[in-house]
Image (cartoon, helix red, strand yellow):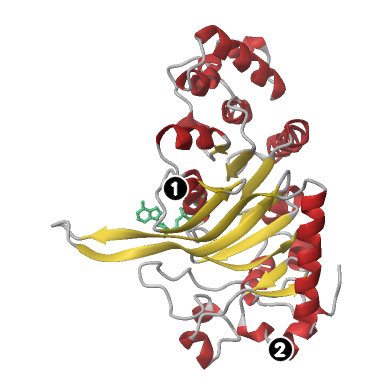
Amino acid sequence: MAIQQANAVTALRTTLQSAFGRADILEVNGIGKTFPIRDMLGRRKGGVSAVDGVSFSLPKQGTLGIVGESGCGKSTLARLLMRLIEPDRGEVNYEGTNVLSLKGKAMKQARTKMQMVFQNPYSSLDPQMSVLDNVAFPLLANGATKAQARERAHHYLDAVGLSRTHADRLPGSLSGGQRQRVAIARALILEPEIVIADEAVSALDKSVQAQVLNLFQDLKRELSLSLIFISHDLHVVEYMSDEVMVMYLGRVVEKGPTARIFGAAAHPYTKALLASAPSVDIAERATADGQAEAALKGDLPSPLNPPSGCRFRTRCPHAMARCAEETPALRELAPGHTAACFLLEGDTAAAALAPTV
Ligand SMILES: Nc1ncnc2c1ncn2[C@@H]1O[C@H](COP(=O)(O)OP(=O)(O)OP(=O)(O)O)[C@@H](O)[C@H]1O
Ligand SMILES: [Mg+2]
């Protein structure tokens, strides 16, 4: 009954969002990638299941945070969305068009609408080119004249808080925070609608991190951007996101409004992840059933041979026989809050709904 009500609320919210122009800009359905592993002779000897059946939607001008341990598939997912890696399966619908079906010019055009900012700007900036030319480059590559591209590059350098004196320098002579601002300007010059930031502030020290996060917030507002914000730092994700998606070994285990994930987490993995956070204030937040989970122990299992059924079961304190036999589906616990765990079925799900935030 509670789930039916939650579904009705979701349907109503979707209708209202559409009516007020806040529909989803991106809708991802069942996207997956298994990297083939080959032996010395080039024969396939298995595969790394890096992303498995991930679905989510990103509301226009919303920010979706993605969290999960190292190796759980966050960067692979980002690269699949950008088509920097070709997915094996699934759909990436950008404003209603599946970009995976696009080719040639149409794909090139669609790609300008989604841009990525990486953790290490060294790898995305050319160390031999001036800051100005680095920022201008994507526009030049898309057919603008040198004068047009440089003029826009100055505009975006200005937007990220860098002055004309930075423009003629080489990236290597800038500080880490300044280089990351250059990388952001470079991502913005094609005027994307969606920016995917993959650990974009992880390499920066705390004070510079705060400046760059605020810059992201300001630019998002000024340029009406939609953001996907990937970080292993739960504080950063909580600060930046409207919604949070938790990944474990290539799959989504929980997704919901930020306040619910940090105040009423339902999946044992999310709870353990929060309990493992270095800061006391995150680790001590309420969970859906009021039960704190112990911090995470052990390593992520190999995606080369992931556990059957629920992939978290080998580290889950509540694992049952069923968890090895069946894969739990994501079920809605509250409007927009879903989690994939057999513990959350039936009466247990109703209990999980109890605290509201
Ligand atoms: N090209 C590739 N070939 C084989 N395996 C790969 C490839 N790229 C990624 N993987 C594997 O896929 C899994 C997911 O990697 P990914 O980089 O997406 O994780 P992540 O969540 O971004 O981790 P981190 O937090 O450390 O950045 C890992 O086991 C990784 O080793
Ligand atoms: Mg990564």
Camera sees residue 35: yes
Q: Position of residue 288 (x, y in %)?
A: 77, 76
Neighbours of disc 2 within 10 Å: few (<14), some (14-19), many (20+): few
Q: Is residue 106 above or below residue 73?
A: above
Dot 1: what SS? helix
Q: Mark 1 or mark 2: which is in front?
A: 1
Looking at the picture, tell me which residue is in the foreground, 204 or 49.
49
- Of all residues shown, which one is farthest toward the right? 356
Q: Quadrant of residue 39?
A: bottom left
Give the labeled residue for mark 2.
Answer: 346
Q: Position of residue 110 (x, y in %)?
A: 52, 37
x 78%, y 36%: residue: 221
Q: Position of residue 232 (x, y in %)?
A: 60, 54
8 horizontally vs 274: left or right: right
x 55%, y 21%: residue: 135
Q: Quadrant of residue 286?
A: bottom right
Give the labeled residue for mark 1.
Answer: 101
Looking at the picture, tell me which residue is in the foreground, 251 or 285.
251
Q: Amino acid at mark 1?
A: Ser
- Of all residues shown, which one is farthest toward the left? 41
Figure quadrant of the C terminus:
bottom right
Task: Find the distance from the CA under tag 1 to the CA under tag 2.
Answer: 39 Å
Sequence-first tag of 1 and 2: 1
